[in-house]
Amino acid sequence: MPAPSRGGSAVSALLKTSTRRAQVCSQCRSNGITTSSNTTRPTTTPSQRAPLNAARRFYSSEATAAATSTPSSFTQPPPLSEQQQQTEPATATTTGRFRIKSGIILTRPPLLTRTLTPFESSFFLYQKRLNERLAAPFRSSFYFKTDTAADLDWRIKLKERHGVPAKDIGRYNPRGRMGWNDELLVGSRTSEPDEVTERLVRDAEMRVSEDGEVIAEDERVPVERPLPRRTEADEKNDVRRLDRALDRTLYLVVRRGEGEKATWGFPSGDVPTHENLHEAYIYSFLLQSTLNMFANYLVLQTALRVLAESAGVNMNTWIVGRVPVAHHVRDPVVGADGKEAPRSGEKVFFLKGRIMAGQADLKGNRHGLTDFKWLTQDELRTELPADYFRSVRNMFADR
């Protein structure tokens, strides 16, 4: 579109604002407030205007606010009872049928790649053998000086591998008359990861000393072997430790209560009316500098606050984002008369986090937690309630 057309459209839109029908939200419409061009707004004095904190609306759509006949369009929150003010925090839906909560799904990402399948191991070995057939011959004189200790060591190892320069392709000569036969037979362990590791470790041992003398097999210095994929925590099935299931993602779950009434879930807490899902308590402080003349607010995330109150502060964590990755709804329990709900419902919105270092500690927690575990996705399926797991299952990683 050319520039004059864009300018004409903008001017036309401005001229039509006076005749355009104003958009009114459902809450203002229910209170009888309109903003059409034919209606003039009453002028109010500063003393009649609603205070700034009255403009906040409740998060829950279920919370009902009584309509007032004040000149202002703001709705006042329903007053809390004395018992609620003393025993319950000022949550967004204390007086409604649902309580809005913010939770965190704290994860430890995989530290190792997953174990290869037999087909993948065979395919990778086939690719290595094919590369040996197509690549240029290995020139040992370019890497080792003749008649040195390194050259003698290379010759001994090359003889042990039946003249094959590669260390991890098994007994296969790509330059021989059987070079075309590069596929594995059924039942062969040549491509198994344990077998490949064993060959590489055995080949790394020095056969010749620095003086050029051949070292006997019982006098060779053993090479440090790689650590196993299964740790001590895996063998003991210690679900509280983070050094287990290194090729899987671990999720922090906590237990509320004791005995038969105990339930497992992710750390969560109520969202007060003065903060969003990703915010926590706001501490204001005035910076003592010439560049900052106004009060500055340190905004913490609600999920971090809940995590600190639940599992302690001895963890280095990172919240991935401010958008919830899952949510869980627990319906309220309504009495037989259908009026007052003996137990209010819950709407929990979960944010995703990562743990970098540290460990959970439930000592002195404020949410009545009694135990914690680091579980994989398969373990969560059997540990969490069925409806709870269905609510969060779509955010789990592949492994």
Image: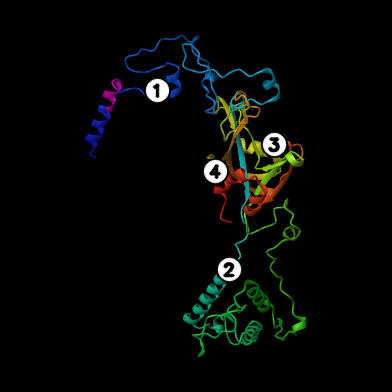
Q: Which residues are magenta?
A: 13-19
Q: Using a 10 Å C-alpha cutoff, classify the residue at mark 4 as few (fewer than 14 neighbours), some (14 to 19) or many (20 or more).
A: some
Mark 2 lies on residue: 117
Residue at horizontal 73%, vertical 75%?
Answer: 222
- Between tags 3 and 2, which lies in front? 2
Q: Is residue 7 left or right of residue 374?
A: left
Residue 77 location, x and y as percent?
56, 19
Residue 328 location, x and y as percent?
58, 39
Asked if residue 319 shows in the view, the reply is no
Q: Amino acid at mark 4?
A: Val
Residue 103 location, x and y as percent?
61, 39
**Sequence-first tag of 4 and 3:** 3
**Sequence-first tag of 3 and 2:** 2
Q: Amino acid at mark 3?
A: Glu
Image height check: is 215 above or below 92?
A: below
Return the mark for residue 24. 1
Q: Using a 10 Å C-alpha cutoff, classify the residue at mark 2 as few (fewer than 14 neighbours), some (14 to 19) or many (20 or more).
A: few
**Sequence-first tag of 2 and 4:** 2
**Sequence-first tag of 1 and 2:** 1
